[in-house]
Image: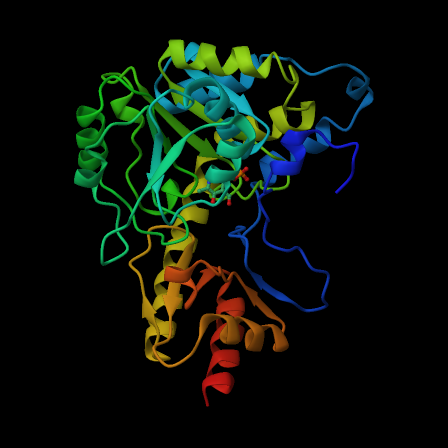
Amino acid sequence: MSRFWSSLTHDLKPYVPGEQPRIADLVKLNTNENPLGPSPRALEAIRGEAADTLRLYPDPQASALRATLATYHRVQPEQVFVGNGSDEVLAHAFAALLKHDAPLLFPDITYSFYPVYCRLFGIAYETVPLGEAMQIRIADYRRPAGAIIVPNPNAPTGIALSRREIAALLEQHPDVPVVIDEAYVDFGAETAIPLVASHRNLLVVQTMSKSRALAGLRIGYAIGDADLIEALTRVKDSFNSYPLGRPAQAGAIASLEDEAWFQQSRARVIEGRERLTRGLKSAGFEVLPSLANFVFARHPAHEGAALAAALRQHAVIVRHFTAPRISDYLRITVGTDEQTNRLLSALSRILG
Ligand SMILES: Cc1ncc(COP(=O)(O)O)c(C=O)c1O
């Protein structure tokens, strides 16, 4: 803390990302990265941009990438916004769309970046408790709201809402912006993008970090009515007009053009999730029904913090949260089969 800091800075409670440790032979299952790697075509396109043209600024509108995304998702380019990871897209959405007199609503257990943005942008919010089975209950959102944000599937539970439930949420609140954060949607949940045509208040946010294995390149995007996209663009152009560099724009386009790789990657992660779930259940864990690339699991006889620490001794890193209702859970990323085997054999040694 320093006397040079603004009062805003003093009051911030920054998000703490999962650690990126450098431990030899580590099984890293703590940040929901995709173990299968990006499309080779994306890598080739990125290498192609490692050229003299890097002295030039990139296209500030990312027009080619937005056109590719528009075709891919069957919307117009004016309905597409891109940013430096979906975290940046979300930050712009909080500033541009989610600050109103009535509170922003989001689940009590959810992506922990949301309250951080609220503090940064001075947004009043209320959290809505998850149900008994840790599920989001749409009926509970029937209360005064200035805006709503929900991840689908939710993080860190992995539990998804159906498109019908999202439509019901939109119908409850036709006059406030509703953001659906679909970071993990490609692993089995239904996207809300088809609802954009009939709901002008819906913004769907997706990322290339998870299903496209491009977390290191930082590409996220939003799809919604052109009016919502214009709001995001106004904030972006008041902050940083060039969020995506040339390699990121080219890599993202090439990734979208490699549908076969994408489909294969999703299918392998989904298979890996089912395998991981079976293994954890036979080790005595309760595993929430996940449609993401991670599972949220607890052991009835062992504390979450102790298990996470013991796994670390075996060079296996998973994510543990200290919030009361979830402190006995571990969030475990779906890794390769070999990583899952190492996790399960470490657990069998720990649990005896
Ligand atoms: C629910 C949710 N939304 C958004 C993100 C941000 O992802 P990125 O900034 O890599 O697109 C994450 C990352 O873990 C997430 O869990």
Residue 339 visible, this orientation: yes
Question: Relative to 319, does residue 313 appear above or below in the rendering?
Answer: below
Q: Quadrant of residue 42?
A: top right
Q: Residue furthest bottom?
A: 352
Question: Relative to 89, does residue 60 appear above or below in the rendering?
Answer: above
Q: Is 250 left or right of 200, judged from the image as shown?
A: right
The coloring applied to the image is rainbow
Which residue is pictured at 25% across the width and 24% down the height? 195
Rendering coords of residue 351 (x, y %) = 45, 85
Q: Quadrant of residue 172?
A: top left
Q: Is 211 left or right of 62, judged from the image as shown?
A: left
Rendering coords of residue 270 (x, y %) = 37, 54
Which residue is pictured at 40% across the width and 22% down the height? 223
Looking at the rendered image, the quarter that the N terminus falls into is top right
Q: Nearer the viewer, residue 288 or 270?
A: 288
Q: Is 181 left or right of 314, judged from the image as shown?
A: left
Rendering coords of residue 226 (x, y %) = 39, 10
Question: Relative to 66, does residue 292 appear above or below in the rendering?
Answer: below
Q: Quadrant of residue 298?
A: bottom left
Q: Residue furthest front?
A: 3
Rendering coords of residue 322 (x, y %) = 48, 61
How many numbered discs?
0
Residue 151 visible, this orientation: no
Which residue is pictured at 52% across the width and 34% down the height? 119
Which residue is pictured at 21% across the width and 32% down the height? 143
